[in-house]
């Protein structure tokens, strides 16, 4: 069956991209907006490649899934610091048996995966991805919504008032300088995440709302870089991968949908918009190409699941020992 040859190739590299995207990726590699200091291609130089289970263990051991709490500096010194949840998301939420991660990819369109997605104990969605009107393909359950700070600050998204954000548990993130010192980040966020957080909390005081400790972004970034044979973009991983790792810390089994594109793969960026750009699936700012290589290596499901369902199966951190 030649069709299965079309599933994601875990050896994808920037040289396989079109000319335009390759240039964009190279520019981001060179830019280093966040001051990343980390040696690239160490493993490639040693011709040493980790197996899927070994990568899973590395992520479990080296990526701390942490959210901000009121006792952390500098937030402990601000009156609004008490708006932060007192406990870690991993103490408050779950554990769940089965979880679905719903990427926002255009290939979810006409997938008919809605029922399967909703059958999970918890479902995570991203940014402005709606369910209303798309239930057949993406389901209607939302347990967690992971949003970036750009969306929180953007006028077009009406973050403070739109009902899109009022269901489920909110988790937000913003890229920090590579050092991940919270003081330094506080003075140099990409977008005004803390201003918007305070305003949202005042309007919706009952809805749980966490902020990811930015250390997690860079710890995960290091796991990607260490396992790739070339220098990756020096920007944080995409919301999709951050959410996948978050769910691996809350769930026994995690199914990720259309992160690795199925036979429905398309240049359509999101299932809910008409905009098309291959960069949405292959990455430009985010090291998304390499995130997908890593997820392909960790996948415990079959290539047929990827091809027909766009589904990857990952084990929760609590289910394996290293
Ligand atoms: O675009 P947005 O970040 O809101 O989409 C959520 C996540 O879904 C992305 O961070 C990315 O991981 C994944 N995605 C994808 N392919 C697309 C669109 C989104 O893998 N075409």
Image: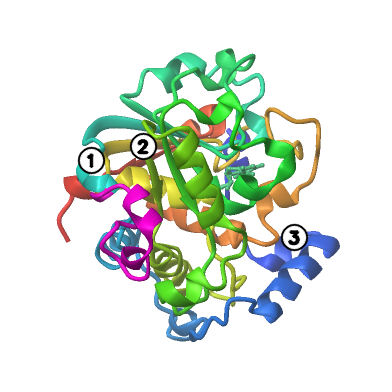
Instruction: Tell me if 70 is positioned left or right of 229 in this view.
Output: left
Looking at the picture, tell me which residue is in the foreground, 291 or 104: 104
Q: CA distance from mark 2 to mark 3?
A: 40 Å
Whether residue 303 is visible here, answered yes or no, is: no
Q: CA distance from mark 3 to mark 1?
A: 42 Å
Task: Give the vertical position of 151 relative to 34 (above or below).
Answer: above
Residue shown at 65% from the left, 31% from the top: 107
- First in sequence, mark 1 or 2: give its number: 1
- On the rendering, which quadrant does ligand 1 occupy? top right
Residue shown at 45% from the left, 32% from the top: 204
Q: Residues within 10 Å of mark 1 (few under 14, many from 20)?
A: few
Highlighted range, magenta: 68-88
Tell me which corner region of the image, top left, top right, bottom left or bottom right, holds residue 11: bottom right
Q: Position of residue 21 (x, y in %)?
A: 78, 61
Q: Are marks 1 and 2 in contact (CB under 8 Å)?
A: yes
Looking at the picture, tell me which residue is in the foreground, 271 or 5: 271
Q: Position of residue 287 (x, y in %)?
A: 59, 62
What residue does disc 2 label? 208
What residue does disc 1 label? 92
Q: CA distance from mark 1 to mark 2?
A: 10 Å
């Amino acid at each position: 069956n030649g069709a299965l040859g079309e599933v994601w190739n875990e050896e994808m590299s920037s040289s396989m991209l079109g000319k335009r995207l390759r240039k964009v990726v190279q520019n981001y590699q060179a830019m280093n907006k966040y001051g990343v200091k980390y040696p690239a291609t160490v493993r490639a130089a040693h011709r040493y490649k980790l197996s899927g289970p070994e990568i899973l263990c590395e992520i479990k051991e080296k990526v701390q899934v942490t959210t901000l709490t009121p006792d952390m500096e500098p937030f402990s010194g601000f009156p609004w610091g008490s708006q932060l949840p007192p406990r870690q998301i991993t103490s408050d939420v779950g554990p769940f048996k089965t979880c679905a991660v719903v990427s926002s990819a255009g290939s979810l369109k006409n997938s008919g995966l809605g029922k399967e997605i909703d059958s999970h104990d918890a479902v995570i969605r991203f940014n402005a991805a709606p369910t209303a009107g798309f239930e057949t393909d993406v389901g209607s359950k939302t347990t967690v919504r992971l949003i970036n700070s750009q969306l929180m600050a953007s006028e077009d998204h009406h973050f403070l008032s739109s009902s899109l954000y009022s269901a489920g548990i909110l988790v937000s993130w913003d890229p920090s300088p590579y050092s991940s010192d919270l003081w330094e980040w506080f003075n140099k966020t990409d977008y005004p995440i803390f201003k918007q957080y305070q305003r949202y909390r005042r309007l919706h005081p009952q809805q749980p709302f966490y902020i990811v400790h930015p250390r997690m972004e860079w710890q995960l970034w290091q796991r990607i870089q260490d396992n790739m044979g070339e220098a990756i973009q020096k920007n944080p991983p995409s919301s999709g991968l951050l959410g996948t790792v978050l769910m691996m810390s809350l769930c026994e089994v995690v199914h990720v949908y259309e992160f690795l594109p199925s036979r429905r793969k398309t240049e359509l960026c999101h299932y809910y918009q008409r905009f098309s750009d291959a960069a949405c699936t292959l990455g430009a700012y985010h090291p998304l190409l390499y995130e997908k290589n890593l997820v392909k290596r960790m996948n415990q499901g079959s290539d047929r699941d990827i091809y027909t369902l766009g589904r990857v199966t990952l084990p929760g951190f609590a289910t394996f020992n290293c």
